[in-house]
Amino acid sequence: MVIKKYIAVTEQEALEMAREELGKDAVIMSVKNMEPRGIWKLFRKASVEVTAAVDEVQPQKEDKMEAPDFSKLQEIISQDIQPEPAADSRKMEQKNRTEELVRRKEILPPDEEKAEETEGKSRNESAAREIEQKLNNLQDLLEKQMNSRKVEEEAGEEEETDLIQSYTQLVRNQLLDSEVEAGYVDQILEEIDGTLKKDAALDNILASIYQKIVLKIGQPRLIDIHSQKTRYIFFIGPTGVGKTTTIAKIASTLKLSRKARVALITSDTYRIAAVEQLKTYANILGIPLKVIYSPDEMEKTKEELESYDLVLIDTAGRSHNNKEQREDIHKLLEMVPEEDREVYLVLSVTTKYRDLVKITQTYSQVTKYNLIFTKLDETDAIGNIYNIRMLTGAPLSYLTWGQNVPDDIGKIDAQRIAKQLLGGNG
């Protein structure tokens, strides 16, 4: 008994597929409704799986031209090269006549002998031409059949190519809808193009793109708490992205969960509210907070906090268009040796990509940095995370959402980001 499964959009289509292949004697063993799950809901429709069985599968007729029967070739050749009966009789008569003339010491006149020889050659040439013509006809037939198969194969390949293009276009539209820049989308699709089989299914295409995105996002780079010396962690970025709240969340996590000795510094004296907010968090956590008004005060403050593992430094929000303010940030950073500091550029995922490009390029002129994205709860399109990672090459580190301290923060999870970009639930 042969048992096969058939999947179609409707039960009727699946049943027709089963009967078409297995014949009218096929027995339907089961019918099962299949609902897509996970991130594939966007790309797949519900389907029906029918399991059918039959004792003996009848060979199906194909529309393709039948292969030529080469056994007939030998018959054609054999028939045509057999001597004709009349020719045999004439040759026997000629032989007997020649023998009789020899006995009587007579010879055939030269003209008659030549005519007889010419007639024999003519018959042989005619038979050879007839055989050659039949072989040529057979060759033409074989070439036509081979060309027909080639056309069918090419048509099949074109159909498979069109299907893959439809799948990739579907995924491309989803990534664009997640606000991944078109250039980065095309880059991903070009890189996986050579790895896909001709008959690749949508699942395979999605899996390849998913893996490619995960690899490009990479592993998060988090704050190092294992250094033997005090580490100074600077948080820079434009106004209004949530630097102060992000610092409070990280300080809480490091203090409460990682048992690190943490201290705070703020140079954001332009906003009184920011200083008061950080003081409140410092009092709750029981950690020191120092306020500095110029880069020159940094040296003395470092001496006071040298017994701590980590010193988190809140800087004032700066306009990326203001050269003087950029120089202030640079001077503050230079007060700490490069090997003792880490810098995190804090950005809002809701900021327009064009503005993010300007911001990141400006800060790249000041220092190297890692990336923190905030306000994840304020948008469904997170393509900017991938865009800026590709644009700057800077490592991703933390994501934040909401105002709850110490909650609403976590490290970058490349797999969750990839799923969300492809329309799934992260």
Image: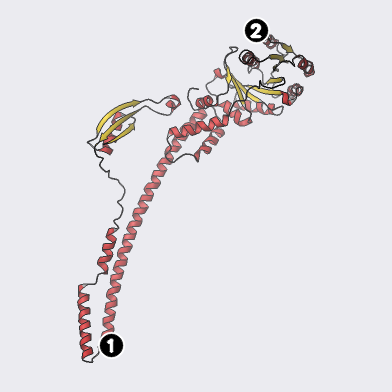
Q: Secondary structure at mark 2?
A: helix
Q: Nearer the viewer, residue 359 or 274?
A: 274
Circles 2, 1 touching at the beta carbon (< 8 Å): no
Q: What residue occupies the far front of the structure in this picture?
A: 228
Q: Quadrant of residue 386?
A: top right
**Nearest to N terminus: mark 2 or mark 1:** 1
**Residue at image x 41%, y 40%?**
160
**Residue at image x 22%, y 86%?**
99
**Which tag is nearer the camera, tag 2 or tag 1?**
2
Location of residue 282 with respect to 105 vertically, above or below: above
Crowding near the residue tagged with mark 2, few <14, some 14–19, many ≥20 C-alpha atoms within 10 Å: few
The numbered disc on residue 110 is 1
Location of residue 158 with respect to 277 vertically, above or below: below
Q: Nearer the viewer, residue 315 or 358?
A: 315
Position in image of residue 403 (x %, y %):
59, 13
Position in image of residue 184 (x %, y %):
56, 33
Q: Nearer the viewer, residue 57 or 234?
A: 57
Q: Which residue is mark 2?
A: 284
Q: Nearer the viewer, residue 244 or 166?
A: 244
Q: Amino acid at mark 2?
A: Ile
Position in image of residue 91 (x %, y %):
22, 79
